[in-house]
Image (cartoon, grey):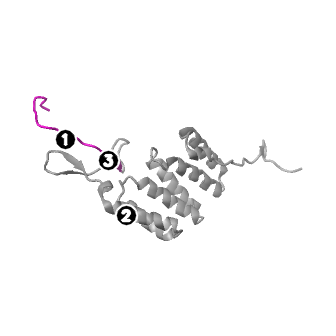
């Protein structure tokens, strides 16, 4: 690059989600050249339809129309995968499955929030519900592991203060304790 060139340089801001199959630092984004000499990211955050779609999906959650909400939230995530509400949409999908008693699918959604959006506003709550989902699935050891990770990663969060007790089955050297 010519450091003496006075031509203004574009400012490039990366937005989006990690690209599939890429390295940890890779980001999948699209940029448009508006002819002004600067590259501007195309972002669903600027699309007014995204907010309307998210609000409509959340209204279905609040109305306890979980199947319709799951479909609407999935459509939102497909259409607007880089929207700032994507983590919330994935979290609410987990809540819908949880409310339906489908703890396996709920845990998948909550794990997705924690993995894909570890710095998102829903990460601590997703981790709490992930642990509770593991409890409901009969896996207290996995639940305790998730709760311990929650307490360590987000110690000041509301979710960390709401970690339920995890009953631990007493064992003896030969296996589970037995009554004699």
- The residue lying toward the viewer, choosing from 74 and 168, is 74
Q: Which residue is mark 3?
A: 15
Residue 171 sits in quarter: top right
Q: Residues within 10 Å of mark 3 (few under 14, many from 20)?
A: some
Asked whether 109 or 91 is in front, the reply is 91
Who comes first in sequence, dot 2 or dot 3?
3
User: Between marks 2 and 3, how big is the CA–CA gap?
Assistant: 21 Å
Closer to the N terminus: mark 1 or mark 2? 1
On the image, which quarter does residue 158 sit in? top right
Q: Is 89 situated left or right of 82 in this image? A: right
> Residue beneath label 1, please?
10
Numbered circle sitting on residue 52: 2
Q: Are marks 1 and 3 in contact (CB under 8 Å)?
A: no
Magenta stretch, residue numbers: 1-19
2 vs 3, front mark: 2
SS at badge 2: helix
């Amino acid at each position: 690059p010519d450091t003496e060139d006075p031509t203004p340089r574009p400012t490039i801001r990366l937005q989006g989600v990690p690209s599939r199959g890429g390295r940890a630092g890779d980001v999948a984004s699209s940029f448009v050249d508006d002819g002004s000499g600067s590259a501007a990211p195309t972002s669903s955050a600027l699309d007014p339809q995204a907010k309307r779609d998210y609000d409509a999906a959340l209204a279905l959650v609040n109305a306890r129309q979980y199947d319709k909400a799951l479909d609407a939230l999935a459509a939102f995530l497909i259409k607007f995968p880089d929207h700032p509400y994507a983590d919330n949409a994935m979290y609410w999908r987990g809540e819908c499955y949880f409310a339906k008693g489908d703890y396996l699918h709920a845990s998948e959604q909550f794990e997705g929030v924690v993995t894909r959006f570890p710095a998102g506003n829903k990460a601590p709550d997703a981790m709490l519900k992930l642990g509770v989902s593991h409890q409901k699935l009969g896996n207290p050891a996995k639940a305790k592991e998730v709760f311990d990770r929650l307490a360590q990663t987000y110690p000041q969060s509301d979710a960390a203060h709401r970690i339920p007790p995890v009953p631990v089955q007493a064992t003896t050297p030969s296996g589970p304790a037995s009554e004699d």
